[in-house]
Image (cartoon, rainbow, N blue to C red):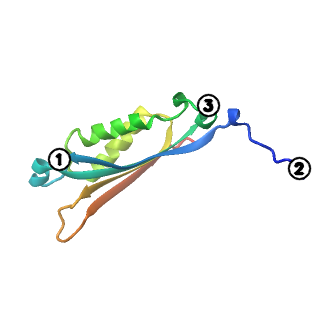
Amino acid sequence: MEKAETCNRQEADRIYTVRLEGLEFRACHGCREDEKLNGNTFRVDFSGEFRSRAGATDTLEDTVNYGAVYRVIEAVMMGERRNLLESLACDIVDRVRCGFREFTWISVSVGKKNPPVAGPCDWSWISTEWKSDQD
């Protein structure tokens, strides 16, 4: 029986996905006056794909610092008031893209707790994605 060939980790260039799930913020986004004044609870789920040698090098310089990604998301959520979840999601995608050029794909979902609808509803969610056109 032949010995299985092993991969060379030093040369490995792999695709990774970083996910930040259940980020929670208290903020004053929404169209209605009570939402603007009293605020609401919002959640953000983030996923981003990037190519890296981090598994081989084991160094932060070769990966995406998800603590820094969190701070960008937090700045959007705690920053300028928005009427729509769509606007928040797009702003997060745009700011992460600008700050972290290594991402080739980003997915963001933004949810609002107890949205103002005509009946019981725990959460409303909006999701958006961006994919680089350079493969």
Crowd around label 1: few <14 · some 14–19 · many ≥20 (10 Å): many
Pinpoint residue 126: horizontal percent, then vertical percent: 33, 57
- Label pair 3/2, CB-CB below 8 angstroms: no
Residue that protrudes farthest toward the bottom in the picture: 119
Pinpoint residue 127: horizontal percent, then vertical percent: 37, 55
How far apart are labels 3 and 2 at the CA level? 29 Å
Q: Which residue is mark 3?
A: 57
Mark in the foreground, 2 or 1 = 2
Mark 2 and mark 1 lie on one chain; the one further toward the N terminus is 2
Mark 3 and mark 1 lie on one chain; the one further toward the N terminus is 1
Quadrant of the image containing the C terminus: top right
Mark 3 and mark 2 lie on one chain; the one further toward the N terminus is 2
How far apart are labels 3 and 1 at the CA level? 42 Å
Amino acid at pointer 2 = Glu
Q: Is residue 37 left or right of residue 21?
A: left
Amino acid at pointer 3 = Thr
Mark in the foreground, 3 or 1 = 3
Amino acid at pointer 1 = Cys
Crowd around label 3: few <14 · some 14–19 · many ≥20 (10 Å): some
Q: Is residue 18 left or right of residue 125?
A: right
How far apart are labels 2 and 1 at the CA level? 64 Å
Pinpoint residue 78: horizontal percent, then vertical percent: 23, 40
Crowd around label 2: few <14 · some 14–19 · many ≥20 (10 Å): few
Pinpoint residue 46: horizontal percent, then vertical percent: 40, 48
Disc number at residue 2?
2
Q: What residue sits 30% from the left and 51% below the top?
A: 43
Secondary structure under badge 1?
loop
Q: What residue sits 13% from the left and 49% below the top?
A: 36
Disc number at residue 28?
1
Q: Is residue 28 left or right of residue 24?
A: left
Q: As displayed, is residue 4 above or below residue 98?
A: below
The residue nearer to you, when weighing 66 against 127, is 66
